[in-house]
Amino acid sequence: MGEERGREKRLNRSPQRVSYPVSLSAGPGAGQEVQTENVTVAEGGVAEITCRLHQYDGSIVVIQNPARQTLFFNGTRALKDERFQLEEFSPRRVRIRLSDARLEDEGGYFCQLYTEDTHHQIATLTVLVAPENPVVEVREQAVEGGEVELSCLVPRSRPAAVLRWYR
């Protein structure tokens, strides 16, 4: 256990992204495409959620949170949560910034492009939580030479902490 004590609990605060293209076809807005990227952020960190627009013709773009509340409508703030800021609204991309990310912010953020039909893509935000100090519990009083059952809990760890027992 001694070698584990000196380790710092740090999470990589740089977002990880995965892109998923969605093609829009037929009728007005044909050939338009919207792409989103999944983002992973440490609790308390900053996340940037990006919707990339291809062949954008000025159609309405809406960004919604996992509860399907509209955050931004064509670049205009719709929800009063000041932690969300519009960083960029251009013909190529819409980018929002979430400061002080919380576990309850986790989920799918909808990037909707309204053409003749409504099309959307979802950027999944994952919030990592650094583990707190482990808590060891003894279920019964230890007797010399006897057996004792120990349990170890690590509160608020996401993903779940990996535990090792040392003698």
Image: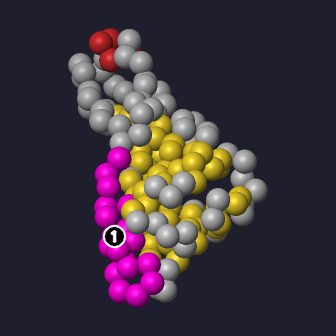
* Magenta span includes 27: yes
Q: Residue 62: give x, y in percent of width and height.
A: 58, 68
Q: Quadrant of residue 31?
A: bottom left
Residue 111 visible (yes or no)? yes
Front in this rendered view, residue 71 or 2: 71
Dot 1: element:
strand
Q: Residue 24: give x, y in percent of width and height.
A: 36, 77
Using the image, determine if residue 138 lies above or below residue 37: above
Q: Residue 83: give x, y in percent of width and height.
A: 67, 46
Residue that appears at 45% across and 72% down: 120
Asked if residue 114 lies left or right of residue 123, the reply is right
Using the image, determine if residue 18 lies above or below residue 112: above
Q: Which residues are magenta?
A: 17-35
Residue that appears at 49% across and 80% down: 115
Quarter placement of the C terminus: top left
Looking at the rendered structure, the kind of residue marked 1 is Val
Using the image, determine if residue 165 lies above or below residue 62: above
Colouring method of the image: secondary structure
Front in this rendered view, residue 50 or 152: 50
Q: Quadrant of residue 157?
A: top left
Quarter placement of the N terminus: top left
Q: Residue 37: give x, y in percent of width and height.
A: 38, 54
Residue 134 visible (yes or no)? no
Front in this rendered view, residue 160 or 113: 113
Residue on which the image places disc 1: 22
Question: Label 1 crowding class (10 Å Cα cut-off): few <14, some 14-19, many 20+?
Answer: some
Using the image, determine if residue 49 lies above or below residue 12: below
Asked if residue 115 lies left or right of residue 151, the reply is right
Residue that appears at 64% across and 59% down: 75
